[in-house]
Image (cartoon, helix red, strand yellow):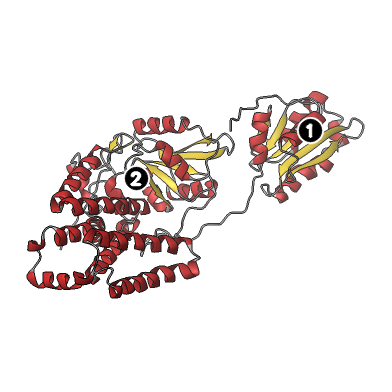
Amino acid sequence: MERHQDKTPLDSSLQTNLERILHDTGHSPDIVIRSLTIGKANKTAVAVLYTEGLVNRGQLASFVIEPISSGYQETEIEKTPQSSVLSKMKESLVKMGDIHDCCDFEQLYPALLSGRAIVLLDGFEKGVSIGINEWKDRGITENIGETVVRGPREAFTETLQTNVMQIRRKIVDPSLWIENRKIGRISQTTISIMYVNGLVDEGVLKELKKRLDQIDIDAILESGYIEEYIQDAWYSPFPTVYSTERPDVIAAGILEGRVAIFVDGTPFVLMVPSLFIEFYQAASDYYQRADISTIMRFLRLISFFIALLGPSFFIAMTTFHQEMIPGAILVGLVAQREGVPFPAFIEALLMEITFEILREAGIRMPRAVGNAVSVVGTLVIGTAAVEAGFVSAAMVIVVSITAISSFVVPADSMSISIRMLRFIFMMLAASFGLFGIMTGLILLLLHLCHLTSFGVPYFAPFGPFIWQDQKDALFRLPRWWVRTRPHLLSKQNQERTKKVQKETS
């Protein structure tokens, strides 16, 4: 649907303007028009327009309707020249700080439909837009998707102003800059980009603005719309834009020189540039001791390899490399597979697809029964499949460990990527054995080294190898050792903290 900007100026006739607004909005019942008059001898018609449900009705009555209807009467208006009535009203009548002029319908419609009150006077080709927006929101609640044992529990909401406020509360500095823009020809969705001036890479900021300005779509309903337009490599299974519901994660990223992208109407905030290793770093890593955080990171990386290569290694070993399996284990595997009619690849494929169906069903079903169905369904189907002779017990164990390992990844977008790649490695293992797995790993590593996120190498600080940034990559060293920000993210202000000499006893 093509939609052109309506820069038609307002008419001096109030009735003409109201008829145009009612026609363009289809006489929608939520568009309310209050007709008033000011003055007694020289009466002037006034119309107050607002969208029901998007305005603060208390402020509307106290600061707009009441003053117009009773506070600005004969004693004032009779002494005011007709040409200055609107200016006088703006100065002394409406006691609000957020007041703007509306000179054409391009300015009027977005203001009216976003919750602002519009005051139009007969005889004037200009109106007044008053900020009294208010709507019901979910409020700040506990984060459910990215839970932590220790750390803040608050999450972003669907309201842009609330989300921005949460970051402002954490970073109290005038160098935290915010820029707004409207994207979506019909939805006119507000997009805010937030960064710390002096820390952000100007090249990254310029490239982000360029990509946002190139978006031409009728509506933006969620941050996923924006992510799909600004990501570097659409063909890659790996996410090059980080998304999260946690304000502390966004605040920490901004302080490292990244740029956050807020989209009105969604609790998921985007952050660029993003690196591969960051998807395996949880927020709680920075709220615990360095040694505990390091162990947890290595545990996640081990889970990454299990989730990616578990079924494929089992397929390769049982199909091509039986001589590498200890004799006692091999005898048990052969006995289990004696009545199974399918090869190992088909067996693993059936189990993986079944588990993915159960996982998706558990997400879509009502929460009260979703978890029970996914867990009980997996146990019942797995046991029944083994007893029926369709799959071996060893394959059920391998698929179960693989599925559990995929849940260890903190970022859901990276977990989905691993689930996709797992099937590719299973096919390579079924075709070429361990040689196919190693070839796939080499190609995967080359692909990761080739990717970029807004000009920053995606596989940094490993490819290219940056020695200084290893302090907060695989390892998480104590804070007094991590003195600098990531070198490829913040090139202007590298120092994060002053050098501290730690005394040991």
Residue at x-position 13% and y-position 57%: 320
Q: Position of residue 440 (x, y in %)?
A: 20, 47
Estimate how packed mark 2 is, as few (under 14), some (14 to 19) or many (20 or more) residues with alpha carbons within 10 Å: many
Task: Mark yes or no: residue 67 visible.
Answer: yes
Q: Left or right: where does residue 166 sit relative to residue 293?
A: right
Residue 443 has which mark?
Answer: none
> What is the total number of numbered labels drawn onto the structure image?
2
Callouts 1 and 2 close, C-beta under 8 Å: no
Q: Position of residue 292 (x, y in %)?
A: 24, 62
Task: Mark yes or no: residue 462 visible.
Answer: no
Observer-nearest of 133 and 428? 428
Estimate how packed mark 1 is, as few (under 14), some (14 to 19) or many (20 or more) residues with alpha carbons within 10 Å: few
* Residues at marks 1 and 2, CA–CA distance in whole angstroms: 49 Å
Where, by quadrant of the figure, is residue 13 drawn?
Answer: top right
Instruction: Give the residue type that dot 1 points to.
Output: Glu
Residue at x-position 19% and y-position 39%: 464
Q: Left or right: where does residue 135 sit relative to residue 244?
A: right
48 to 331, vertically: above or below: above
Image quarter of the C terminus:
bottom left
Residue at x-position 82% and y-position 38%: 72
Where, by quadrant of the figure, is residue 79 drawn?
Answer: top right
Q: Position of residue 415 (x, y in %)?
A: 33, 54
Observer-nearest of 370 and 301? 370
- What residue does disc 2 label? 239
Where, by quadrant of the figure, is residue 131 drawn?
Answer: top right
- What residue does disc 1 label? 19
Looking at marks 1 and 2 on the same chain, the residue that comes earlier in the sequence is marked by 1
Could you tell me which secondary element the residue under label 2 belongs to?
Answer: loop
Q: Position of residue 472 (x, y in %)?
A: 24, 50
Instruction: Give the residue type that dot 2 points to.
Output: Pro
264 to 320, vertically: above or below: above
Q: Left or right: where does residue 205 sit relative to residue 265?
A: left
